Image (cartoon, rainbow, N blue to C red):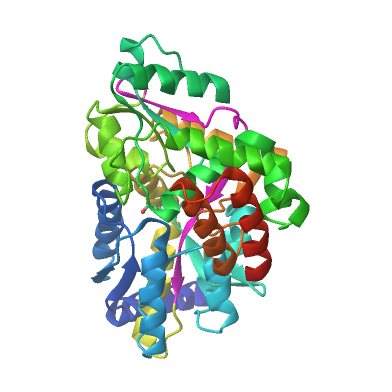
Amino acid sequence: MRGYFGRKTAFVAALLATTSMAMAEDVEVLHWWTSGGEAAALNVLKQDLAAKGIGWVDMPVAGGGGEAAMTTLRARVTAGDAPTAVQMLGFDIQDWAEQGKLANLDAVATEEGWDKVVPAALQAFSKYDGHWVSAPVNVHSTNWVWANKSILDGLGIAQPTTWEEFVAAMQKVKDSGKTALAHGGQPWQDATMFDGVVLSVGGVEFYKKAFVDLDPAALGSDQMVEVFNRMATLRSFADDNFSGRDWNLASAMVINNEAAFQIMGDWAKGEFLKAGKVPGKDFLCFRVPGTQGDVSFNSDQFAMFAQTDPAAQAAQAEMARAIMAPSFQSAFNVVKGSVPARTDVPNDAFDDCGKQGMKELADASANGTLVGSIAHGHANKAAVKNAIYDVVTANFNGETDAKTAVANLVSAVEAAK
Ligand code: BGC
């Protein structure tokens, strides 16, 4: 009996292997990974898939946070021409799943045991109605500061640990004639800083009450006035040309000794690494002062749009399997600046910032101090996120004072939720 089943299983496995290879075709991938560091990480994925016989049709749509990519996606789906695989964040995944557009990945998820290794905070977005609809490729987090070590050393500035120390450090840099804060004035970048500032003012409890529960009292509180005051402080440390600048060009200012700090998600580390910079030696990574222990996260996932063609379905399953392989999760995230989307990946290959990120993610998850990024679609659906973007950016550009911004925030969120 055993021999029979053994032979039969081997035969079926061989058949499956040949069919899936014969059937696998190209995947068309819509994504917004267009910077140097992002492209390097994307190459790790392309090469991994190429080695498995899966071809890649590239569909890049630049723009951090993915707003432009999501607009393109809507147009493609409306035209009845959805891409095979799409980089997607948080609530957008749930939204497309609710519309019945996403493929069911349960078969590969069960085979590969995703339920046991993907953190619950990610499963909340990867699964809809109990079914897997996307494969998480990483976990990023937004409450990070990236600092130029030689500028700090030259001015005798120690790594700041409180908001006040951070402001004093930025003042010292500004007084020296260098740019204190490298920033790109785009709504999603303003909002990315906002994630960290909210945490610095009121911690996770305030963050959740205001931006997850959307409690009007928290949104309209004095603490929120302080959030906008801090945003204005940050604005005063950016250079005059910040408006419209891409995030990777802001990172380049820190890399090239033109600016001391950037507040940005850990995709910024990908730019530093691409430029040959070494953490601890050339640059420092630390949490937005006053948010140590808290992690505002976002996870890039690949959602697969439902296909009828079996060859396309096979390619999607193979891509999902490849993305979730522990060795790939290590190789990719080392380059991307993010950390693995599975709990069982060793940290050996990661640099000190990556090791810190992995530990802090695990600790925050255990301690209840892990929150979804407001800026990157992990706190609210797109309508609310965009309403927050508008209020934050108008204020950052000096169109409103802190009190008006708070009043606008309350009404904009109320209208969008
Ligand atoms: C994504 C990152 C990306 C960043 C900047 C974020 O929304 O999660 O993967 O690197 O935008 O493009």
Q: Nearer the viewer, residue 115 or 336?
A: 336
Q: Is residue 77 above or below residue 121?
A: below
Q: In the visual, does 65 lie left or right of 200?
A: left
Q: Is residue 353 above or below residue 75?
A: above
Q: Which corner quadrant of the image does residue 369 belong to?
A: top right
For the point 31% across and 18% down, the residue is 151
Q: Give the position of the C terminus as an image quadrant.
A: bottom right
| Residue 282 within the segment the image draws in magenta | yes
For the point 40% across and 16% down, the residue is 172
Q: In the visual, does 45 lie left or right of 70?
A: left
**Residue 347's x, y, as percent?**
46, 35
**Residue 21's x, y, as percent?**
30, 76
Q: Give the position of the N terminus as an image quadrant.
A: bottom right
For the point 53% across and 19% down, the residue is 165
Do we see residue 121 in this rendering?
A: yes
Do we see residue 273 in this rendering?
A: no
Q: Nearer the viewer, residue 386 or 264?
A: 386
**Residue 329's x, y, as percent?**
42, 50
| Residue 222 within the segment the image draws in magenta | no
Q: Tell how many labels.
A: 0
Q: Is residue 413 above or below residue 82?
A: above
Q: Nearer the viewer, residue 348 or 285?
A: 285
Q: Which residues are magenta?
A: 280-304
**Residue 344's x, y, as percent?**
54, 45
Q: In the visual, does 252 lie left or right of 182?
A: left
